[in-house]
Image: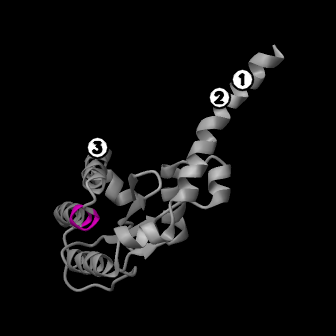
């Protein structure tokens, strides 16, 4: 009985340690290579241009690796994206139309988190397809092109469901966040 419990515990520990190792190996330098300043500028401009066509506020956060305490606690990528959505106040927009695109380079994953009004109008399967589009491009090393292509689609969706009604204040910064 004791041996069975040990091997069961050991089998749960191995994937956890592998995940932690993957994050530890993913450096900020890798993040800067994937998203150099010119890519960040292009993303910021695409967000600014898109927000002129809709009432949503869009943020992009790229994280090369999750913090150790989040990994140790077993936090998943989706949970991390939701935590960042709250931390950066993306939920706190006048029309409740905030959208976060979260990129985790260590796990090669993208998550999109939306505020309640966006979630009511645009089905989750649409967001999952956009995440897949980005990760496929990232797998080919096309971080710049894949991100801009996804932003174009996100902005088109938001313009369709939340069209701009004249000039409005920009509620959240448009520049991507690199963590």
Measured in 3D between alpha carbons, the distance from the residue under mark 1 to the one under mark 3, in whole angstroms, is: 38 Å
Task: Confirm whether residue 140 shows in the render.
Answer: yes
Q: Residues within 10 Å of mark 2 (few under 14, many from 20)?
A: few
- Callout 1–callout 2 Cβ contact below 8 Å: yes
Pinpoint residue 109: horizontal percent, then vertical percent: 40, 51
Label placed on residue 125:
3
Work out whether 3 lies above or below 153: above
Label placed on residue 94:
none
Pinpoint residue 168: horizontal percent, then vertical percent: 28, 84
* Left-right relation of 143 to 89: left
* Mark toward the start of the polypeptide (3 vs 2): 2
Label 2 residue SS: helix
Closer to the camera: disc 3 or disc 2? Answer: 2
Pinpoint residue 98: horizontal percent, then vertical percent: 38, 67
- Callout 1–callout 3 Cβ contact below 8 Å: no
* Left-right relation of 69 to 168: right
- Callout 3–callout 2 Cβ contact below 8 Å: no
Residue occupied by mark 2: 11
Label 1 residue SS: helix
Task: Confirm whether residue 90 shows in the render.
Answer: no
Closer to the camera: disc 1 or disc 3? Answer: 1
Measured in 3D between alpha carbons, the distance from the residue under mark 3 to the one under mark 2, in whole angstroms, is: 33 Å
User: Farthest right residue?
Assistant: 2
Measured in 3D between alpha carbons, the distance from the residue under mark 1 to the one under mark 2, in whole angstroms, is: 6 Å
Work out whether 15 lies above or below 9: below
**Which segment is the magenta one?**
143-147
Label 3 residue SS: helix
Label placed on residue 7:
1
User: Farthest top residue?
Assistant: 1
* Left-right relation of 84 to 2: left
Residue 104 location, quadrant: bottom left
């Amino acid at each position: 009985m004791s041996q069975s419990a040990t091997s069961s515990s050991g089998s749960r520990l191995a994937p956890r340690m592998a995940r932690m190792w993957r994050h530890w190996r993913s450096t900020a330098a890798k993040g800067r290579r994937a998203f150099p300043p010119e890519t960040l500028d292009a993303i910021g401009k695409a967000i600014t241009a898109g927000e002129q066509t809709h009432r949503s506020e869009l943020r992009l956060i790229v994280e090369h690796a999750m913090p150790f305490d989040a990994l140790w606690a077993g936090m998943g990528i989706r949970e991390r994206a939701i935590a960042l959505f709250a931390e950066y106040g993306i939920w706190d927009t006048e029309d409740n139309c905030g959208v976060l695109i979260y990129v985790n380079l260590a796990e090669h994953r993208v998550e999109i988190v939306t505020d309640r009004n966006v979630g009511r109008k645009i089905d989750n399967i649409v967001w999952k397809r956009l995440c897949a589009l980005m990760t496929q491009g990232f797998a080919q090393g096309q971080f710049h092109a894949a991100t801009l292509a996804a932003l174009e689609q996100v902005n088109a969706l938001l313009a369709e469901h939340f069209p701009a009604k004249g000039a409005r204040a920009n509620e959240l910064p448009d520049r991507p966040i690199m963590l």
